[in-house]
Image (spheres, coloured by chain):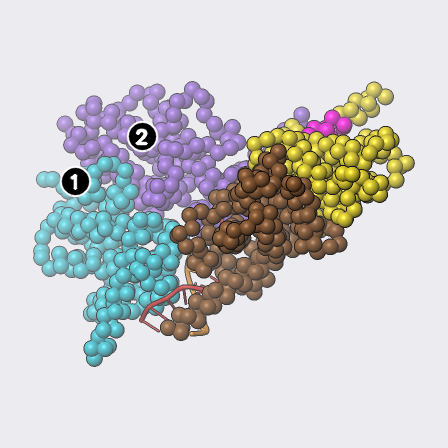
Chain colours: A brown, B yellow, C cyan, D purple, E red, F orange
Amino acid sequence: MAEINRRERKKIFSQKAIVESAVKLFAQKGYQETTVADIMSEADLGIGTFYNYFQSKEDILKHLLFQIIVETNDKFEELQKESRLAGETLREMFLFTAEILDSKRFVLPLFLSAAHKGGFKEHSMEPSKDMSETERPASMPKKMTFKHIFDQIIKAGQASGEFRQDIPAEIITEMFHSVFQAASFSSIQISFLANIRYKLILIMDGIILKK
Amino acid sequence: MAEINRRERKKIFSQKAIVESAVKLFAQKGYQETTVADIMSEADLGIGTFYNYFQSKEDILKHLLFQIIVETNDKFEELQKESRLAGETLREMFLFTAEILDSKRFVLPLFLSAAHKGGFKEHSMEPSKDMSETERPASMPKKMTFKHIFDQIIKAGQASGEFRQDIPAEIITEMFHSVFQAASFSSIQISFLANIRYKLILIMDGIILKK
Amino acid sequence: MAEINRRERKKIFSQKAIVESAVKLFAQKGYQETTVADIMSEADLGIGTFYNYFQSKEDILKHLLFQIIVETNDKFEELQKESRLAGETLREMFLFTAEILDSKRFVLPLFLSAAHKGGFKEHSMEPSKDMSETERPASMPKKMTFKHIFDQIIKAGQASGEFRQDIPAEIITEMFHSVFQAASFSSIQISFLANIRYKLILIMDGIILKK
Amino acid sequence: MAEINRRERKKIFSQKAIVESAVKLFAQKGYQETTVADIMSEADLGIGTFYNYFQSKEDILKHLLFQIIVETNDKFEELQKESRLAGETLREMFLFTAEILDSKRFVLPLFLSAAHKGGFKEHSMEPSKDMSETERPASMPKKMTFKHIFDQIIKAGQASGEFRQDIPAEIITEMFHSVFQAASFSSIQISFLANIRYKLILIMDGIILKK
DNA sequence: TATGAATGAGAGTTCATTCAT
DNA sequence: TATGAATGAACTCTCATTCAT
């Protein structure tokens, strides 16, 4: 019925409002410093409503991180289908990831502090309840983390002789990773993407073997 | 008097115990998760005693960060006196900093989250009350932050033609900075310093101009 | 009309489903620990529907207690019609009550805590709205509580010389009452009814005058 | 020092104030209905202070129950030393227990509801932190619960031929137990102890074998 | 009549900070 | 200088109840 649809639409609207408020406030003040009350006040909804959509404050965080992982995996799958040089794939993937993180900069300190206190691990990420619209088809066996994706590309490049082999792929992956982090909190007066691009050049120059 | 000296020694002893406990616990559990009660219990002192030495929980953090800055500045001054190639200075400074951070890894997420929420800025750092023993002589004009130090070395290298000039010095500085961050939270099974050294090679290869 | 009948039947069906779910869950988890949402989920109905049948969560409890009182009164009336010795009536009534409570054990702690905090009193019990099908005919002057019923039987026994008279009837009534309570929470490995029967023997031996 | 003593005395005073307020309010309104804020307001102390003395709201309950068990065990030990008939011991123990419960009537519904939802068991009771003044010497091997104590007395009476043997000791124990419960919530206009005494007569008459 | 998303008062608990000793 | 009991604002989370559909 239209009535059911309307209700459903309203529900999705509320969920979206909550997520957007959370993203905004996490970005502005950080996760720890943002209270559930803050989020719901920003979303113009009652506090209790939060718990109709997410099980806990940590749950919405997981939701957000999971979303990012999903988007990244989609892009990676897409890039895999076209066959290119590892360098190109790496470049594309890097810039795509940069864009996502640019819009959700708050996640990085969370990844960091989570890693630090051994809290939720990047790979134990589960979708929160009621994520049907972003849920993966069962066909996709497992979500890959940033690390897995970049590792894979770099190893392919090393195997094909495109990239230097005297530095472990994991180390290079970590460098890309850290570039995102640094750029997220950069105080240099250039844009996030310009920042990222410079560093991309630097690392690429450091790893591509010229014949 | 001996009496006064004893008191003085005891005072310094307590302060040291507090700082060491704080460092230990911040490293173990993170800043947010460590309570003042935790610190003082570890230091085997009463809770109230904390506030004889630091104005607030945040204050001891500033103190720790300030200490790091002081040590770094000392090293930089020392390196300045010997005249070397920028590349060598950079390398030395980088490895020295790595060592300090290796022993105080907890500071990095704090720098990040602090930078993020616009809390205490790296350059607004003030010594906490009663720091006589670590305080700089008035002769030293200003403490330089990591950023300032690396910027200066890199700019010198660019000016002398040792380093490439098509990438802003600030960007390169940030890369070094981010290497520390990433290595602090690395899950790769190699030591912090080995990790750092690989990345140092990578960046150096990316910036040094070969003739 | 058939239409009205259907609606009527559906209405009764929903009410029954709610009551049964409530009984089941109250018995399983206790009253406090059972939420309205739990009940309606068990009944496979929407939360809001609950409030079409009961005014509040407490209301359904009153309803359940009222039902028990009604059943007990019916039995008592029936026993009154046959004329027997007080001892036999007491025995019958006791075992009948035991059976009811056996199936609704959760009510006893409620009686207790209700009595305790002076909440709804056993005798202020009112039928909840819309109880037409269980409602008593106006002809029945008043519902009698457990206490009234047992009191009456025991006083009759004392008057006829069957039971000892040196102990107030109310006290004996209370003993029967407490036997139910204790048996409800017994951790002894025998059945509720076996437990009850042993105690019946004990009390009967204590009150029946042998000539 | 006197100063330490004063502090210590004040601390004990606060603990006592909290415990007394809790007892009063639990008795008045029940455990569930009493909030920590209520208790501390009654005790004229800040809310946070509660958590300097007890780990949680449930903790103070355990503390109170533990106290009762300790007192009961002491009495039992004492009675054991004097050698009497089981009937006398039972009578003494019963009346002593009645007195304790008379002053802390609120505990019974708690025992009940705890038993019901399988929460803390009577025998898993642990002293709460900082109970030095009521703590048992290590010499006392184990606290016995009400049930254990009464069971032991009744079995002794059955073994010596004082009590009837056709009814399991556990059942008789439970009857005593239930008498406390019922008397705690009695609405009969006689005192708790008078109530108890009548029932004691009834049960004794039911179990003592007359030759 | 049936629904379930929205609500917000109120619960238990934490912890940086104060202050009388 | 050292102490630690006292504090209460602020937090996360629960749930009976409402109301627009």
Q: Tell me the magenta residue range.
A: B11-20
Q: Which mark is residue C70?
A: none
- At numbered mark 2, what does the secondary structure look like: helix, strand or loop? helix
Could you tell me which chain the residue with mark 1 belongs to? C
**Any part of residue C36 in sight:** yes
Amino acid type at circle 1 is Ile
Amino acid at dot 2:
His
Closer to us: D32 or B181: B181
Location of residue B64 in the rendering, given as x and y in whole percent from the top left corner: 73, 36
Are the residues flagged by discs 2 and 1 in contact, CB closer than 8 Å? no
Q: Nearer the viewer, residue D211 or A92?
A: A92
Location of residue D121 (image quadrant): top left
Q: Which mark is residue C201?
A: 1
Q: Where, quadrant-wise, is the C terminus of chain B in this rendering?
A: top right
Q: Residue A51 colored magenta?
A: no
**Crowdedness near tag 2: few (<14), some (14–19) or many (≥20) residues, C-alpha within 10 Å:** few
Q: What residue sits right under mark 2 in the picture?
A: D148
